[in-house]
């Protein structure tokens, strides 16, 4: 056995040890901190774009950046079908030591994702005008939203491939590699943004070009990692499979998870359409405040993504006590972080908004909106950990219920009722109420699943 191969085996054994036996708190932070750092890097994609677009001192372009956000979220949702579905199945296959099946899942998932991206580019380019109108663009923002949207759609395969491969690498415990890909992409985006926006005078369209190219650099890094045979789970063309169980597992978990992201995109689009009646300054303020809120969201996503392979592996191994401990500590950690962020946003909302735009009316509206949205943070992290737990367990029906609950069952109906009854205040406070209701539902679903799993395990013994 070569020294290199022996070292790789030892590394693989350490990963398995981390998933199965390390103290839970240590395992969560070991898996999650690189992911949180990676998600913070990913967050910079959005914040950097908003920062430089804000420097244009044009509320119409700032509003257009918010209007096009649902399109990016929809691309993420489609790639999440593969990224989340395949990652969940890969983790469970590893828990059963079935590495050949894991390779088939990986190889098939990557192929499906790139194919979906190409299809999005074709369909999106054909129907670009009605898409932009549906997003909520009006006369002042239409041309800016069109320019931004077209570039994103043409780069759909790159954006989706980069996002999905990062998730797939995390499923085997390669969180640091995933983070490095995000870092490379963000550095490229940071350098390219001012060049395309200001030097080449492309405005908001330049921000979209920089975003696509940043994703391209991250994607290339991941491809090189697989080509050099450094991953635990191998991509092989011969393992691209049409086996029904692989496709069923990917889509039965991936679709519910992506439905959540898709509904988030739809919800933002509906919110933007309602917000247009309050003026472009309000739409721009919502955009800035929402991007700032993603600081908390991305931290929670990092911890949830870090918990997912731990949960999937131990659930597959029927180590239910460890699964329960991971759930409790994951929820506690995210709730504490959410509470701290709520306090900070409450104290410094005006200063935070003004960092991204010098426009007084946008600052005023954005600060008010942030003070309302921030009440989601203490509960949203725990809800996200709970939802990811159900995905990792492979519970398709329960996962689907939770994926549609936050935005579909709760937020969208509350949004219309509150907006009609309370105006802009209702529009803003609809989300915190929806998040609280979603958390309560998640706790009920999780408790039911764990009781059934323990009962089944006992009967089998």
Image (cartoon, rainbow, N blue to C red):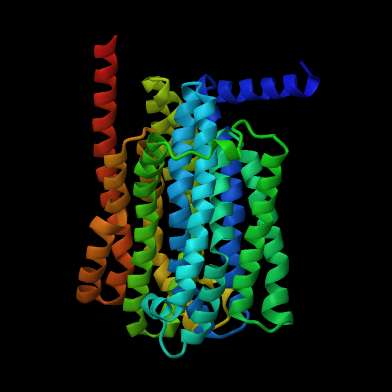
The percent coordinates of residue 24 (x first, y second) are: 49, 26
Q: Report whether residue 25 is seen.
A: no
**Left or right of 82, for residue 395:** left
Work out whether residue 13 or residue 27 is closer to the camera in this orientation and state it: 13
Q: Residue at x 67, y 24 (%)?
A: 11
The percent coordinates of residue 387 (x first, y second) are: 36, 42
Q: Residue at x 51, y 67 (%)?
A: 121
The percent coordinates of residue 75 (x first, y second) are: 47, 61
Q: Report whether residue 265 is seen.
A: yes
Which quadrant: the N terminus?
top right
Work out whether residue 60 or residue 90 is closer to the camera in this orientation and state it: 90
Q: State which quadrant residue 209 falls in.
A: bottom right
Q: State which quadrant residue 54 falls in.
A: bottom right
Q: Residue at x 25, y 25 (%)?
A: 451
Q: Residue at x 45, y 69 (%)?
A: 123
Name, please, the residue furthest toward the right. 3
Work out whether residue 409 or residue 296 is closer to the camera in this orientation and state it: 409
Name, please, the residue furthest toward the bottom. 139
> Relative to residue 354, is residue 459 depicted above or below?
above
> Relative to residue 22, is residue 358 depicted above or below?
below
**Left or right of 23, for residue 219:** right
């Amino acid at each position: 056995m070569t020294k290199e191969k022996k070292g790789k085996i030892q590394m693989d054994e350490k990963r398995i040890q981390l998933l199965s036996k390390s103290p839970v708190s240590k395992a969560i932070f070991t898996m999650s901190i690189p992911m949180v750092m990676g998600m913070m890097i990913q967050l910079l994609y959005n914040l950097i774009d908003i920062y430089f677009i804000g420097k244009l001192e044009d509320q119409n372009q700032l509003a257009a950046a918010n209007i096009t956000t649902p399109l990016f979220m929809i691309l993420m949702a489609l790639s999440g079908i593969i990224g989340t579905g395949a990652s969940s199945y890969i983790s469970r296959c590893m828990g059963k030591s079935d590495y050949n099946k894991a390779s088939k899942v990986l190889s098939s998932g990557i192929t499906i994702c790139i194919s979906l991206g190409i299809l999005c580019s074709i369909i999106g380019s054909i129907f670009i005008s009605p898409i932009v109108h549906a997003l909520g663009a009006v006369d002042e923002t239409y041309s800016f939203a069109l320019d931004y949207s077209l570039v994103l759609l043409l780069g759909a395969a790159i954006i989706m491939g980069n996002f999905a491969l990062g998730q797939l690498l995390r499923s085997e415990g390669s969180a640091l590699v995933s983070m490095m890909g995000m870092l490379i992409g963000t550095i490229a985006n940071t350098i390219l943004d001012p060049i395309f926006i200001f030097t080449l005078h492309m405005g908001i369209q330049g921000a979209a070009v920089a975003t696509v190219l940043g994703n391209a650099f991250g994607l290339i890094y991941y491809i090189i990692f697989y080509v050099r045979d450094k991953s635990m789970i191998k991509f092989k063309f011969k393992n691209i499979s049409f086996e029904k169980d692989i496709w069923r597992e990917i889509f039965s978990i991936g679709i519910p998870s992506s439905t959540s992201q898709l509904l988030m995109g739809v919800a933002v689009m509906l919110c933007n359409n309602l917000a247009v009646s309050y003026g472009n300054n309000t739409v721009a303020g919502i955009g800035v405040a929402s991007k700032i809120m993603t600081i908390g969201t991305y931290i929670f996503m990092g911890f949830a993504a870090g918990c997912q392979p731990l949960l999937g592996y131990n659930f597959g191994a029927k180590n239910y006590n460890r699964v329960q401990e991971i759930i409790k500590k994951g929820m506690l950690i995210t709730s504490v972080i959410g509470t701290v962020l709520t306090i900070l946003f409450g104290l410094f909302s005006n200063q935070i908004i003004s960092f991204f735009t010098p426009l007084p009316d946008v600052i005023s509206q954005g600060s008010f909106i942030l003070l309302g949205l921030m009440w989601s943070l203490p509960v949203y992290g725990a809800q996200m950990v709970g939802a990811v737990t159900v995905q990792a367990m492979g519970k398709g029906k329960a996962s689907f219920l939770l994926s549609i609950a936050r935005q579909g069952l709760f937020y969208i109906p509350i949004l219309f009722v509150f907006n009609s009854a309370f105006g802009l205040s209702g529009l803003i406070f609809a989300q915190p109420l929806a998040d609280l209701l979603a958390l309560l539902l998640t706790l009920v679903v999780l408790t039911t699943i764990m009781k059934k799993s323990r009962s089944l395990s006992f009967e089998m013994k």
